[in-house]
Amino acid sequence: MLARVGVLDGKRAIVTGAASGIGRASAALFAREGAQVVAVDIEKAALEANVAEIERAGGVACAHAADVAEEDAMRSVVERCVDRFGGVDVLFANAGTSGARLDLLQARFPILELEAKDWRAVLNVNLIGAFLGIKHAAPVMIEQGGGSIICTASVAGLRANAGPAPYSASKAGVVSLVQTAAWQLSGTGVRVNAICPGLIETGMTRPIFDLARARGSEGRIGQLNPLRRAGQPEEIAQAALFLAGDASSYLNGQAIAVDGGLSSGHPTTLPRA
Ligand SMILES: NC(=O)c1ccc[n+]([C@@H]2O[C@H](COP(=O)([O-])OP(=O)(O)OC[C@H]3O[C@@H](n4cnc5c(N)ncnc54)[C@H](O)[C@@H]3O)[C@@H](O)[C@H]2O)c1
């Protein structure tokens, strides 16, 4: 019988936001496909439980509790991957926060109610966290002769109406960051791309799903995209796997929407299914 070859066999990967949602699914998939994974999150207990699950399934992973917005913490994440697994081939900078203030959901002009601290809290994690990951992982990759960096942006970073102002601006910043980083890492073999998920059922969006279920309107979730459903974390993990692996070796500097087609059209009214 032939031994199964994993897409990421021999690769060392860091996945941030691995305690929940997209990061959790990606850490598990990367490990299933042969990567040695440093799973990172600020939520230590959930992170450790997920790593234990990966190990029970036969994967290789370690849990590293860290705040991605802190430079020393991100430096130590990269050092952990090098110490434990001997290098870094993949960084999935995925940790994020919506920063949604529930008290503003009913406001007519919520942007006028926001304070600078609301912005800083979101930018620190979503944008500066991604930057710190690139800053500390890329030198190791350059030394090795290459690597793949993937950042989670969002459809909210492409156009308005998919998130609060600080969140959307932070994700637009991530799209810009990967474009600039791809160019500034020219000639190094390090690729930098972003994934822009649409509406995915995760910890971040659970309140939306819970509210819709409570109102009996869950059938309306995801109806704005041509697939007419929300996505699952595993569907984003599959896109991250492609970007992490050598199959995407000529893909660089791009922001790829994985959103059921949502961002491919202008708003329209479709005939009822
Ligand atoms: N769920 C969606 O619909 C959706 C859509 C577009 C983009 N995204 C993005 O996907 C990424 C993953 O989010 P998710 O949907 O899986 O949500 P999630 O809440 O399930 O997971 C996010 C994880 O990031 C961790 N995290 C938050 N701040 C952190 C910090 N400072 N340091 C370390 N870890 C931190 C959280 O603890 C959590 O485990 C985020 O960047 C999010 O903005 C999500």
Image (cartoon, rainbow, N blue to C red):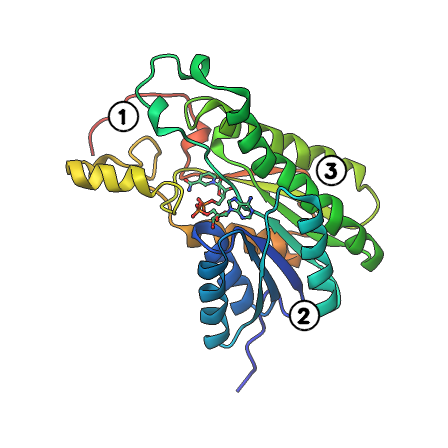
> Label 2's element?
loop
Return the residue at label 2.
Answer: 10
Label 1 element class? loop
The answer to whether residue 228 is visible is no
Identity, as a three-letter code, of the amino acid under mark 1: Leu
Q: Name which quarter of the figure residue 182 lies in.
A: top right
Q: Are marks 2 and 1 in contact (CB under 8 Å)?
A: no
Q: Residue at x 55, y 37 (%)?
A: 153
Quick one: label 1 or label 3, which is nearer the N terminus?
3
Residue lying furthest bottom:
1
Q: Which residue is identified by label 1?
A: 270
Left/right of residue 208 with respect to residue 22 in the rendered view: left
Q: Is residue 114 above or below residue 38?
A: above
Q: Nearer the viewer, residue 141 or 136?
A: 136
Q: Residue 26: in sight, yes or no? A: yes
| Label 3 sits on residue | 181
User: Is residue 3 or residue 149 the one in the foreground?
Assistant: 149
Give percent across and percent down for residue 167. 50, 29
Task: Calculate the distance from the C-alpha at mark 2 to the C-alpha at mark 1.
Answer: 47 Å
In this rendering, the answer to whether 201 lies above or below 109 is below
Residue drawn at point x = 35 percent, y = 33 percent: 225
Point out residue 75 in the picture as x, y percentages from the top left corner. Answer: 72, 51
Q: Nearer the viewer, residue 128 or 13?
A: 128
Numbered circle sitting on residue 1: none
